[in-house]
Image (spheres, rainbow, N blue to C red):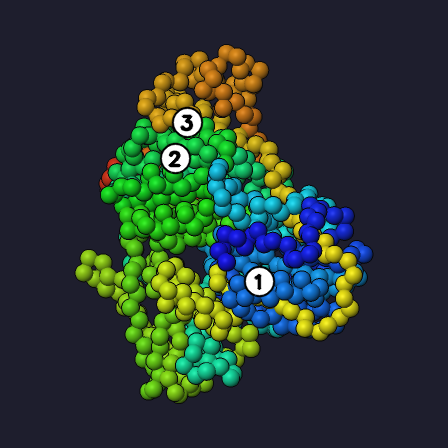
């Protein structure tokens, strides 16, 4: 059967399905999630509890999200008092078996992945009798990524946003027709408990949800437990940030014993190891000038007007993206080229072609960024991507989007086809962002993906990606294994993953051979990369005991890596290998599905089966109030003589000047009362007229005043921020700002490091030997003691 037909399965014979969007009684009672996090690996068991409180038998459909990196490896059911393990089968065979049992009125379950998106799954529970109960247990494992501050991040996806379908498209996804209700009206509840383990000790846990106090199970704090408190509403993904007492950035190796009874020489029968590397060759520090081209694609679809969080007072998605884009524009190196694209159902660029980064083009672009709105309809990113990627110049592409698209495979394929000419750094904004889409376009081009749930996260992660884009690419890690005689290490999965200096890299290997020792001595030598004739080599020596784990998380992750690499090919032989690997490992793929069949004959159902869809929370009404006080700061300072943007929907050809009347308004500080006098202002300037808020960002205000070359010029606004009186020289002002950042925002250095690098570079060019005197005087003036090493002295 063609994959496109899966979402439109015909009803079983002689059992007409009556689709009710949202009955008063929904069979799904609760979702209970147990997470075991060990180091950088999470093993998850999710239980779905059903009870039919109606007087008729039901067929129940539940569509829900999982992370695209999750490896689903087990599924089982409890029908009444009977425990039944699911079988993983070829998809056509599994569905045929499910429908056969449905037709003869026997209980059955069908679990399958959405053919259009790897992060969406559907569970069909058939023939649930009146008063009948069922518990379905889903098991999956995934590797966890570290955050910029060293935390290990686990996310349980809960929100499943609609995916925008292209006009006239025949493609369909499981999510298109899901009934949605306000989260307060959801008839089922979610609970989560997590067991944490790390030999480095567990310090604390942060979350976007309310948690119970952290309970340590051991005196050395290497094991702890934590849970969601009661009353959690399913209106946001559950995010846990686990902080270990020691920030782990050193190579490690985990060796896992093979599955008892599995064939020796097979993936599941042999030992498998997980090697964690942190390649750290000397990376050039970003300087004042650099070549290269940067493109920024900003999603301006209607859904970007929604809040980044469930709180109605939170910042909108587009507002967070715009503020972050300001940080990125301020951090670009002089000498590079750049352009900005806004896309939705239509798209336009700020310039006909990329322009050189100067003070003037930076200010012009900032003016345009402030004018961006979430008013371009649906999310159609394919055409602007095609336009930007057809270039002989190597590009660094930054994409900001909420990821609500349906033609994901087409977009990823387009990015993949141009992977040699660009790197894509993607940012998924808000709850329910598609991990398959955001991660897929980054991975296809050798870039990196980030998922944003707050403004602060976005700024730090965007600057981290910009730092990566300025690094030379780390390619072709060469591993040399030194193993006991008779053993061989075979790498599994993709060897072409993007690697950045200092960033974590995961690699899997199967230990093949007759002597599967329990305590092998393993030495690994690797060459991270060579650049300009230099190579960087590191050696690691491990002596460890192979761990036994009946759930085999490392084996499942290795199988997922193999499947992911093979699924990208269209070779018949490799597709057959995909099927064989999935069936032998239990890890679900596009060709397979789980089916649970109760072979015990019960009472024959006397009524036709009714169809029920489990509703998802409706988050599309979560609009946020504007928090844009910083725009007044920009209006009063950086844009006094700045030309404005052209008409929306057309590339900018020329910039008319801002009228003098408006400039006087900004200079006289009457923006706060501008709404009363809106008729006296030009239409292109009215977007500035937004009252400031009490919590406007002091850091963003300071960043907005930096010049393109890295310096800060003295004006009243800067003096008010620094709390200073009279100062004259730009160099002296720039020194003071750098010192001030270290004193007041040291904990946010991940946001302003690139800004600082530009400033220090400019100071060296402009002041020469006088810089040391300026730094000494600045420390004395501000009453601080910032090291001169900060300034490269």
Residue 165: give x, y in percent of width and height: 51, 41
| Residue under numbered circle 1 | 95
Side (left or right) of 240 relative to 380: right
Residue under the point 31% across and 30% down: 352
Q: Toward the viewer: 771 or 118? A: 118
Q: What element carries label 3?
A: loop
In contact (CB < 8 Å): disc 1 and disc 3: no
Nearest to viewer (mark 2 / mark 1):
1
Q: Tell me the quarter of the picture where residue 332 sits.
A: top left
Mark 2 burial class by Cα count in 10 Å: few <14, some 14-19, many 20+: many
Residue 274, relative to residue 303: is it above or below? below
Q: What element carries label 1?
A: helix
Mark 1 burial class by Cα count in 10 Å: few <14, some 14-19, many 20+: many
Residue 788: give x, y in percent of width and height: 34, 48
Residue 259, relative to residue 372: is it above or below? below
State which tag comes first along the sequence, 2 or 1. 1
Q: Toward the viewer: 768 or 123? A: 123
Q: Toward the viewer: 115 or 17? A: 17
| Residue under numbered circle 2 | 341
Residue, far front: 14
Residue under the point 21% across and 62% down: 534
Nearest to viewer (mark 1 / mark 3):
1
Residue under the point 37% across and 35% down: 340
Report how far apart the C-alphas of labels 2 and 1 lie in the structure. Answer: 44 Å
Report how far apart the C-alphas of labels 1 and 3 lie in the structure. Answer: 47 Å
Q: Is mark 2 on a helix, strand or loop?
A: strand
Side (left or right) of 233 relative to 767: right
| Residue under numbered circle 3 | 649
């Amino acid at each position: 059967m063609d994959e496109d037909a899966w979402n439109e399965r015909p009803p079983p014979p002689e059992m007409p399905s009556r689709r009710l969007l949202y009955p008063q009684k929904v069979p799904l009672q609760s979702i209970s999630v147990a997470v075991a996090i060990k180091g950088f690996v999470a093993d998850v068991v999710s239980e779905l509890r059903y009870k039919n409180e109606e007087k008729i038998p039901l067929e129940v459909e539940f569509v829900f999200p999982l992370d695209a990196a999750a490896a689903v490896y087990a599924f089982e059911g409890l029908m009444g008092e009977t425990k039944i393990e699911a079988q993983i089968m070829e998809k056509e065979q599994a569905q045929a078996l499910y429908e056969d049992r449905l037709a003869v009125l026997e209980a059955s379950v069908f679990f399958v992945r959405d053919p259009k998106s790897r992060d969406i799954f559907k569970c069909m529970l058939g023939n649930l009798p009146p008063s009948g109960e069922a518990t379905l247990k889903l098991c999956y494992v995934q590797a966890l990524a570290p955050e910029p501050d060293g935390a290990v991040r686990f996310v349980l996806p809960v929100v499943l946003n609609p995916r925008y379908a292209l006009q006239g498209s025949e493609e369909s996804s499981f999510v298109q027709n899901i009934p949605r209700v306000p989260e307060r009206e959801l008839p089922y509840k979610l609970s989560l408990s997590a067991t944490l383990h790390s030999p480095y000790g567990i310090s604390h846990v942060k979350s976007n949800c309310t948690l119970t106090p952290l309970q340590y199970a051991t005196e050395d704090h290497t094991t702890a437990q934590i849970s969601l408190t009661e009353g959690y509403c399913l209106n946001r993904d559950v995010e846990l940030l686990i902080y270990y007492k020691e920030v782990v950035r050193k190579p490690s190796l985990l060796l896992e014993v093979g599955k008892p009874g599995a064939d020796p020489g097979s993936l599941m029968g042999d030992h498998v190891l997980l090697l964690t590397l942190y390649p750290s060759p000397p990376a050039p520090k970003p300087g004042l000038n650099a070549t290269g081209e940067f493109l920024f694609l900003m999603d301006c679809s209607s859904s970007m007007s929604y809040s980044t969080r469930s709180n109605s007072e939170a910042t909108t998605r587009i507002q967070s993206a715009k503020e972050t884009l300001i940080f990125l524009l301020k951090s670009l190196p002089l000498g590079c080229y750049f352009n900005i694209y806004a896309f939705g159902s239509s798209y336009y660029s700020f310039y006909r072609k990329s322009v050189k980064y100067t003070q003037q083009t930076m200010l012009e672009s900032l003016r345009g960024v402030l004018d961006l709105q979430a008013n371009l309809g649906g999310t159609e990113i394919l055409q602007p991507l095609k336009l930007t990627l057809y270039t002989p110049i190597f590009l660094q592409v930054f994409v900001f989007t909420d990821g609500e698209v349906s033609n994901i495979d087409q977009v990823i394929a387009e990015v993949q086809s141009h992977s040699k000419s660009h790197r894509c750094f993607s940012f998924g904004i808000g709850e329910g962002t598609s991990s398959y889409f955001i991660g897929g376009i980054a991975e296809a081009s050798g870039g990196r993906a980030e998922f944003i749930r707050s403004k602060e996260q976005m700024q730090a992660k965007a600057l981290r990606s910009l730092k990566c884009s300025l690094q030379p690419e780390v390619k072709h890690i060469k591993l040399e294994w030194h193993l006991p005689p008779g053993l061989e290490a075979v790498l599994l999965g993709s060897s072409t993953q993007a690697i950045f200096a200092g960033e974590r890299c995961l690699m899997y290997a199967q230990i093949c051979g007759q002597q599967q020792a329990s305590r092998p001595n393993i030495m690994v030598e690797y060459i991270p990369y060579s650049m300009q004739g230099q190579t960087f080599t590191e050696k690691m020596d491990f002596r460890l005991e192979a761990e036994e784990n009946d759930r085999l998380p490392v084996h499942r992750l290795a199988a997922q890596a193999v499947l992911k690499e093979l699924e990208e090919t269209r070779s018949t032989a490799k597709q057959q290998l995909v099927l064989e690997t999935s069936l032998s490992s239990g890890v679900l793929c596009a060709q397979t599905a789980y089916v649970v069949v109760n072979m015990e004959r019960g009472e024959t159902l006397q009524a036709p089966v009714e169809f029920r869809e489990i509703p998802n929370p409706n988050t599309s009404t979560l609009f946020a109030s504007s928090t844009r006080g910083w725009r007044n700061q920009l209006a009063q300072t950086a844009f006094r003589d700045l030309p404005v943007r052209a008409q929306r929907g057309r590339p900018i050809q020329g910039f008319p000047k801002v009228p003098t009347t408006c400039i006087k308004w900004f200079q006289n500080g009457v923006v706060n009362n501008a709404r009363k006098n809106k008729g006296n202002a030009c239409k292109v300037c009215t977007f500035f007229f937004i009252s400031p808020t009490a919590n406007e960002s002091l850091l963003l205000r300071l960043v907005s005043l930096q010049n393109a070359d890295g310096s800060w010029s003295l004006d009243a606004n800067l003096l008010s921020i620094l709390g200073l009186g009279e100062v004259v020289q730009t160099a002296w002002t720039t020194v003071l700002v750098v010192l001030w950042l270290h004193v007041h925002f040291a904990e946010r250095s991940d946001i302003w490091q690139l800004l600082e690098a530009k400033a220090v570079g400019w100071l060296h060019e402009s002041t020469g030997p006088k810089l040391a005197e300026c730094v000494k005087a600045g420390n004395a003036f501000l009453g601080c003691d910032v090291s001169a090493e900060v300034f490269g002295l």
